[in-house]
Amino acid sequence: MTAKPHLAVLGTGLMGAPMARRLLGGGFAVTVWNRSPEKAQALAPDGARIATSVAEAVREADVVITMLDNGAVVTDVLFAQGAAEALKDGAVVIDMSSIPPSTARDHAHRLETLGVDHLDAPVSGGTVGAAQGTLAIMAGGSEAVFQRVKAVFAPLGRALLVGPSGSGQLAKLANQAIVGITIGAVAEALLLAERGGADPGAVREAIRGGFAESRILDLHGLRMVEREFTPGGKVTTQIKDLETILATADELGLDLPLSRDVHRRYIELRDTLGGGDLDHAALFLQLEAASPKRN
């Protein structure tokens, strides 16, 4: 696409809203829609056009970006609420939600029969990355379609095509397995330091720059030290991703014991400790509660 395409963004929540602002700031014309209309309306001062229905949002769009809660919601918005039927021939749907790879492949096939191209392109980087335009974008689909819309990705972050349809979602599952397991590792390490009598904040600083350095140690380790769990990525979202990881592993005949254990602990954090709406770094609280201090 040489001229800037008209965009529609479906889903303007924690991630979708800052992404829409980045696209508006990049000079794109953007129409937005959200199930809760007030979340879409909040983008009007930034220059977004507000649509009252999905069909209205996508009718004139060259590229439609979806950033929705899960696969069932994406399916509903695309195929039950009229988006797919309203899309013009040659449009591209970029699904940046995190959904099962099999669902992404199904969406690509169904849209293809309507003359619409599809990329699954989930992201990593959280709300900070969305606001700063530094998201890691993992795309699945054809090289030709990816190249057509590459300029759309530029304000959002670094996009890489990782394989055919569904591959972007597989990459996101790999990412989320690493994130969930590493959060557990950092939480265990800082809990070990604290219970042993060391200053966990100082330990975190001391080991940074060595082999243990990571974004998780940097950002989520600080959350644990400060016991500040206002959500960027919610526990409920991490649970959803881990459940998709485990279901996909079952389809492939794989056993992922570390993912299974972390999933069990996140479930306990949500159901027993009431931490479903906390940041996923709050896994620290589950590990802490599972090992009460000795008298």
Image (cartoon, rainbow, N blue to C red):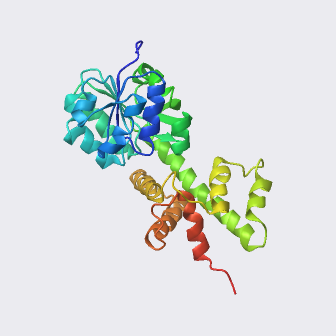
Q: Residue furthest front?
A: 45
Q: 207 left or right of 29?
A: right
Quadrant for the C terminus in the image = bottom right
Q: Position of residue 62 (x, y in %)?
A: 32, 22
Q: Position of residue 144 (x, y in %)?
A: 41, 20
Q: Residue furthest bottom?
A: 295
**In front: 256, or 204?**
204
Quick check: can you spot residue 11? no
**In front: 99, or 62?**
62
Q: 125 left or right of 105?
A: right
Figure check: 63 above or below 224: above
Figure check: 20 above or below 211: above
Q: Position of residue 84 (x, y in %)?
A: 23, 33
Q: Position of residue 180 (x, y in %)?
A: 55, 56
Quick check: can you spot residue 21? yes
- Residue 16: quarter of image: top left
Quadrant for the N terminus in the image = top left
Figure check: 21 above or below 28: below
User: How many labels sit on residues?
Assistant: 0
Q: Residue at x 35, y 22 (%)?
A: 6
**In front: 58, or 93?**
58
- Residue 220: quarter of image: bottom right
Q: 172 left or right of 101?
A: right
